[in-house]
Image (tube, helix red, strand yellow):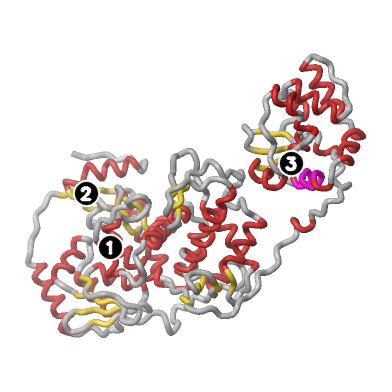
Amino acid sequence: MPTLEQTLAEYEIDLLRIIANRWDVDLPRDHKRAVSALSKAMLDREKAESVWERLSDEQRGALQVLLASAEHKMPTGTFKRLAGEVRPMGADRLVREKPHLAPISVAEALYYLGLIAYGGGQAFVYVPSDLAPLLPTNKTGYDLSAAAQRSEPLPSVPEPQNIRPADTSLVDDLTTFLVGCYIEDVPLVDESLSDEMRMALEPFFIGKVDAARVALMVNLALDMGIAALEEGKIKPVPAKARSWLDVPRPAQVRALAESWQSSRRFNELLHVPTLRVERTGTWQNDPLLARQAILNYLELVPPSDWWSVEDLIETIHEEEPDFMRPDGDYESWYIRDARTNKYLRGFEHWHAVDGALLRFILNVPMHLLGLLDIAESGKFCRLTPYGRALVGSGEWPPSVPNAPNEGKPITVDADGTCRALRATNRYERFQLARFTNWIGGVSSVEGYRYLITPESVARAKRQGVRIEQIITFLQRVTDNGVPQTVVQQLQTWAAAEAQTATLEQLWVLRVPSKALLDDLFELPKVRRYLGARLGDQAVAVRADQREALLKALRENNLHVEVAQ
């Protein structure tokens, strides 16, 4: 922070005279000498203590809070709510109105005593760095203990009506989404999916396909690295996708919750239905700040009982209103009321903006992630075991691979219809969908139905899946329960395939090691141009994809020599 002399040097001589008069200091006419003389007098410990003792308890209290802040500074908006404003005045008005004789606020009284100053283009208030240590902050009648104490725990409320228990359907729908991205081209549009794509997914999802839920799912998939963008299209990343798909449901829920906790891709403020956010490029909120505030204050709620959302929001409003605005700025964010289209600027709109965001976080992402039960249209909440674990008031539910609600086998009928329940291993369902066609809808009880067809098997073949692998997979996931008619049909298709010859021109990419080839298959922008492996150190490449592959390899800093 600036020193006292640096601060005073920015003031006009009329303001210096007002401050000097309050400190009983005679000033020379020369501005530079006046700054030096006033600075020297104000840095006298006895004079500083004398001025401190003349302050009211309210003035000392506000100054004490400022001195207790990091670097003795505070955002202007925050200090304004604590101590009021300082009216802007030019030299003529300053001389004419003499605001120091009748200050309208605590802040104005402190300003004309030279005890506080404004910096950063009025962005923050501070106490000059060499003046702060001289102020006897121990000599105050202002009680700061209330501000320093932790909030009281929130009370429980009786069990409400219209309870909506949290579920973990996001796990199932994300699995389905990854399958869809594997088979089809799914473009990322405005950090989510297009409305048309969301509606196309509706028959395949257990949960709703509203914009916020789909955006949460898509962005968490990208955050966790189980999906990546390939030329604007969302594609699964095989190894990382398997590491999430092939673990018990509790571990999957935990991974989603912890990814959401640290995600900057998913921005809740953009999805609050009562708000319209204009991202002009001049400001950008940090979504982590709001989540961290919520999670911190959730430590105050009853761990297993219901509590009022309004009680929690009001507690944050009273104690940490600037939770997502560290600079205390309530003026420059371009946010409109979705109903009236009017801008919501100023601290008076806190409940309409900041409060609405807190309510949304509780009722939408935290509910969708299985962390909170909600009731009576979001007026009341209760932490689930997953929620208690995330806020540190409980242990994560154990991930037991052979638990009763995990690892249910896939069943196959004689006509090639395959059934997978929600309790079926998600990686096995993902693999099943690669060589089948989806039939029917989906429900939490009946699960998913697929059909093995010549077209679906041919599609899998184009992606490198052989019929022998399909038969082996089905025998394993059904506990050898595949009807013989299905096995025979697959073998018939394999035999017919064996009688079909294909002559095509290919290139061969050779690499010095198996490890490097494995790494190439993990790079989404490279993998899409790779064909069948030709041993441990080579892979086939279609002639029409050679140039695209060369470009992708060079973008990943891999030197390639082309042999003609």
**Where residue 123 sits in the image (x, y, percent)?**
62, 37
Q: What is the three-letter code of the residue carrying label 3? A: Ser
Q: Which residues are magenta?
A: 59-65
Residue at the far top in the pictured view: 30
Closer to the observer: label 3 or label 2?
3
Residue ID at (16%, 82%):
415
**Could you tell me what secondary structure mostly forms the magenta stretch?**
helix
**Where residue 473 sits in the image (x, y, percent)?**
27, 75
Q: CA distance from mark 1 to mark 3?
A: 56 Å
Q: Badge 1: few (under 14), some or many (20 or more) residues near its Cα, within 10 Å?
A: some
Q: Badge 3: few (under 14), some or many (20 or more) residues near its Cα, within 10 Å?
A: some
Give left or right: position of 543 versus 407.
Answer: left
- 101 above or below 319? above
In this view, the residue in front, 376 or 369, is: 376
Residue ID at (76%, 20%):
13
Residue annotated with mark 2: 508
Q: Earlier in the sequence, mark 1 or mark 2?
A: 1
Closer to the observer: label 1 or label 2?
1
Callouts 1 and 3 close, C-beta under 8 Å:
no
Residue annotated with mark 1: 199
Q: CA distance from mark 3 to mark 2?
A: 79 Å
Q: Is residue 62 magenta?
A: yes
Residue annotated with mark 3: 105
Q: What is the three-letter code of the residue carrying label 1? A: Met
